Amino acid sequence: MAGAARELAGNAAEAGAIATLQGRDPEVAAFDAIPGWTRSRIEVEVHGGTVLVEVEPASLVPPLARLLVARAKAHAGS
């Protein structure tokens, strides 16, 4: 699940950066880029042209999931 969270975080960050370039809302694009079951486990921050995404993987042991949070960053360019 940690690997899946890493992939989802990267995809969401890239979708947010692309949305920034297109003049769309990067946070909405990041949320739209992931499956519904993950939406309660994602945090998105936008700083200028940079989109930061954190995804907490699903886990039977919640304290373990918090230790395996995946982080990704994408830049929309200058």
Image (cartoon, rainbow, N blue to C red):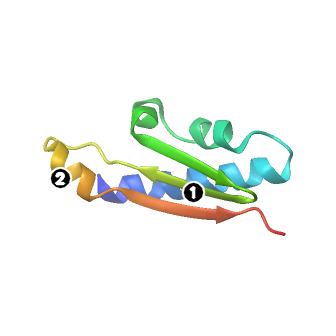
Q: Nearer the viewer, residue 21 or 43?
A: 43
- Left or right: 48, with 55 as reference point: right
For marks 2 and 1, give the CA distance.
22 Å
Q: Is residue 72 above or below residue 55?
A: below
Q: Is residue 37 left or right of residue 12?
A: left
In the rendering, at what x and y percent does residue 74 appear?
64, 63
**Residue 71 falls in which quadrant of the image?**
bottom left
Q: Quadrant of residue 11 in the image?
A: bottom right
Residue type indicated by callout 1: Leu
Q: Kindly indicate the quadrant of the structure image that contains residue 6.
A: bottom left
Residue picked out by circle 1: 52
User: Residue 9: image x %, image y %?
Assistant: 49, 54
Residue at coordinates 76% horizontally, 47% vertically from top-left?
19
Q: Quadrant of the C terminus?
A: bottom right
* Residue type, mark 2 in image: Leu
Q: Position of residue 75 (x, y in %)?
A: 70, 65
Above or below residue 11? Residue 72 is below
How packed is label 2: few (under 14 Cα within 10 Å), some, or many (20 or more)?
few
Answer with left or right where residue 59 lies relative to residue 25: left
Secondary-structure class at tag 2: helix
- How many other residues sit within 10 Å of disc 1, few (<14), some (14-19) or many (≥20)? many
Q: Is residue 69 left or right of residue 26?
A: left
Q: Nearer the viewer, residue 26 or 11?
A: 26
With respect to residue 54, does 78 lie above or below? Answer: below
Identity of the residue furthest to the front in this view: 47
Res. 64 mark: 2
- Dot 1 lies on which element? strand
Q: Residue at x 61, y 44 (%)?
A: 30
Provide residue 34's location: percent of width, then percent of height. 52, 40
